[in-house]
Image (cartoon, rainbow, N blue to C red):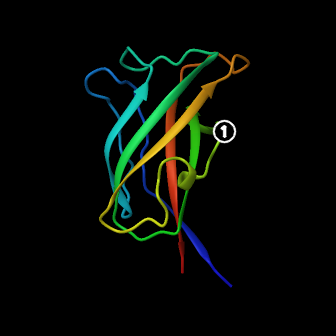
Amino acid sequence: MDVRASFVVLVCLIGLSCVEMLHYKTCPSPCGKVDTVDVTPCNSDPCKLQKGQTYSVNVTFTSDVDSQASKAVVHGIIAGVHVPFPIPNDDGCKSGIQCPINKQKTYQYVATLPVKSEYPSVSTTCRITAMLLMLL
């Protein structure tokens, strides 16, 4: 039987922006490091996501581990509580990452994130996490 362990690798995005320099905070991870983050369209710092719009998030990272798969998870952080944010495709291997993932190689994760009109109007920090799934 295959046992899978998930590892947080990509990024906690704080103050999304794509003006000149994107301000973001990486989560500590032994599995890799984030090289760049781009969010489009976005013309303010922090990025003000508008309801009814769709945004593209592009994260370039270098893996420090070998992995068979990748899964993305998005949360809004509201009053310190992580609230799940559904995304159209959570499979990183179908979002620009060529799987399997190899140690010391650079990859690009691309996600399309719709902000639906029915979402409540709140100020939040967005946390995007990618998990690398390894067969042990």
Which quadrant of the view contains residue 79?
Answer: top right
Q: Is residue 117 above or below residue 92?
A: above
In this view, the residue in front, 103 or 98, is 98
Give the residue pinned by disc 1: 88
- The local crowd at label 1, few if under 14, some if 14 to 19, many if 20 or more residues have their Cα within 10 Å, is few
Q: Is residue 63 above or below residue 51?
A: below
Residue occupying the point 38% across, 14% down: 43
46 left or right, relative to 131: left
Residue occupying the point 46% across, 58% down: 98
Q: Position of residue 33 (x, y in %)?
A: 32, 54
Which quadrant of the view contains residue 88?
Answer: top right
Q: Is residue 116 above or below residue 96?
A: above
Q: Position of residue 117 (x, y in %)?
A: 70, 16
Q: Is residue 90 above or below residue 13?
A: below
Residue occupying the point 68% across, 22% down: 116
| Residue farthest toward the bottom in the current orientation of the protein | 1
33 left or right, relative to 40: left
Count all numbered tags in the image, as a single digit: 1
* Quadrant for the C terminus in the image: bottom right
Q: Position of residue 56 (x, y in %)?
A: 49, 30
Q: Is residue 78 visible?
A: no
Q: Which secondary structure lies at badge 1?
A: loop
In this view, the residue in front, 55 or 46, is 55
Q: Is residue 132 visible?
A: yes
Identify which amino acid the numbered label 1 is placed on. Pro
Q: Position of residue 31 (x, y in %)?
A: 38, 63
* Quadrant for the N terminus in the image: bottom right
| Residue farthest toward the left in the current orientation of the protein | 20
